[in-house]
Image (spheres, helix red, strand yellow):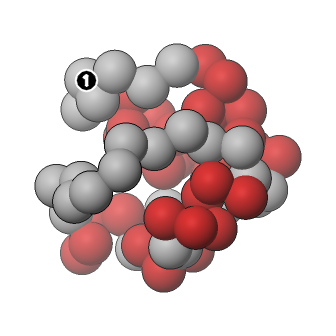
Amino acid sequence: MSDVVKDFNTEELIEYLKKKNLKLEESHFEILRKEEISGLAFLDTTKDEFRSYGLKLPEGNVA
């Protein structure tokens, strides 16, 4: 996935994630838009950073 999304802008990233059926909700995409998360930023963002943006993530490892 990293080679695919690294050059995506925010909207391209969102469209890619929507196609992957990851059970994400529109509120998740709104956070990506608000924080202007691009593909490279998405790959570099930690779980704690995502949580600080308001995303609820499961505990433990996420594949």
Residue found 67% across the figure and 24% down from its top: 27
Residue at the outermost left position: 63
Numbered disc 1: secondary structure? loop
Q: Position of residue 41 (x, y in %)?
A: 57, 74
62 vs 37, nearest the viewer: 62
Quarter residue 2 falls in: bottom left
Q: Residue at x 73, y 58 (%)?
A: 52
Q: Is residue 52 left or right of residue 59?
A: right
Of residues 12 and 17, the one drawn nearer to the viewer in this rendering: 17
- Residue positioned most to the right: 34
Quadrant of image for the N terminus: bottom left
**Could one spot residue 42 in this view of the protein?**
no
Q: Is residue 46 left or right of residue 50?
A: left
Quadrant of the rendering where the C terminus is positioned: bottom left
Q: Which residue is at 53% across, 73% downward?
A: 45
Residue with the most extreme front position: 59
Horizontal and vertical percent position of residue 36: 76, 58
Residue 11: x, y in percent?
A: 61, 44
- Mark 1, other Cα within 10 Å: few <14 / some 14–19 / many ≥20: few
Name the residue nearer the viewer: 23 or 59. Answer: 59
Question: Quick check: 43 left or right of 61?
Answer: right
Type of amino acid under label 1? Asn
Q: x%, y% of residue 50? A: 60, 58
11 shown above or below 36: above
Does residue 28 appear anywhere in the picture?
Answer: yes
Q: Residue at x 48, y 80 (%)?
A: 44
Q: Which residue is mark 1?
A: 21
Q: Is residue 47 above or below residue 30?
A: below
